Image (cartoon, rainbow, N blue to C red):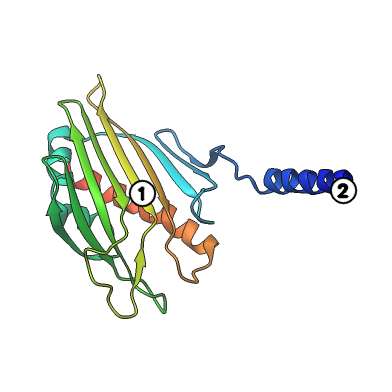
Amino acid sequence: MLKTFSILLLSIVFYQTENKKSNVWETKINESNYQVFVRESDISDIKEIKIIHNFKGNFKKLALALNDIETNKKLFSSCTEAKLLKRIDAQSSYQYFYFKMPLTISDRDIVSKVTIKSTDTTYSLGTSSTDGKMVAIKSKVIRMTQANTSWQFKKTSSGDIYMEYYASADPKGKIPKWLVNAFAIREARISIDILKKMIR
């Protein structure tokens, strides 16, 4: 009996060790002022993304742009609808986003809690998904309930803007994970380029 229990215990430990996801960031893009890293996620098979970027821009314009929900919609090429659902306080709110997907992929939507914090030299915008019960689910649309993003900006002593972007999401559905991973990195860069144009 003891021998059987020992074998079972060793099997569980081995399984957990083999299936433990790595928290080490892997470099995908390493340019002089633009780096992209990925790592395995605890919430899905889709990898988490982290981007570090230094760029020139007007820091005051950046805060004004990201405070506006319509601007946030413009940052994502697939986002066709964005609206404020409920103001929680001066820094936080619930917002709704709808994403039109290409080809035969089902559209997605999400209800997120959005939190903004800022000073004269720093700005952060974080989103965390909710259960989505504030908005009725539309026919043939997949509601995302596991998605988090973080935009961190800091005005440097040289006047440039230092940015760290983080995203972790489970889009659900039957999209191949390699396609989602590639799409996420591509869309993040497009969003950053759009933002940079807004705040020149």
Residue 198 has which mark? none
In the picture of the structure, the residue carrying the numbered disc 2 is: 1
Other residues around mark 2 within 10 Å, as few (<14) / some (14–19) / many (≥20): few
Question: Where residue 86 sits: x, y (%)?
Answer: 13, 55
Farthest-out residue, top = 157
- Residue type, mark 1 in image: Asn
Please report the residue visible at 15 percent of the width from the left and 26 percent of the height from the top.
120
Other residues around mark 1 within 10 Å, as few (<14) / some (14–19) / many (≥20): some
Image label count: 2
Please report the residue visible at 25 percent of the width from the left and 34 percent of the height from the top.
56
Element carrying mark 1: strand
Residue 122 to residue 8: above or below: above
Closer to the eye: label 1 or 2: 2
Residue 172 to residue 1: above or below: below
Question: Where residue 40 sits: x, y (%)?
Answer: 55, 47
Q: Are marks 1 and 2 in contact (CB under 8 Å)?
A: no
- Residue type, mark 2 in image: Met
The reply, left or right, for residue 29 in relation to residue 60 is right
In the picture of the structure, the residue carrying the numbered disc 1 is: 148
Element carrying mark 2: loop
Closest to the observer: 73 or 161? 73
- For the residues marked 1 and 2, what is the alpha-carbon distance in whole angstroms? 47 Å
Closest to the observer: 19 or 65? 19
**Mark sitting earlier along the chain (1/2):** 2
Within the image, what quadrant is residue 85 found in? bottom left
Within the image, what quadrant is residue 154 found in? top left
Question: Where residue 195 sits: x, y (%)?
Answer: 23, 47
Q: Is residue 200 visible?
A: no
Q: Quadrant of the C terminus?
A: top left
Question: Where residue 131 sits: x, y (%)?
Answer: 32, 59
Please report the residue visible at 36 percent of the width from the left and 59 percent of the height from the top.
145
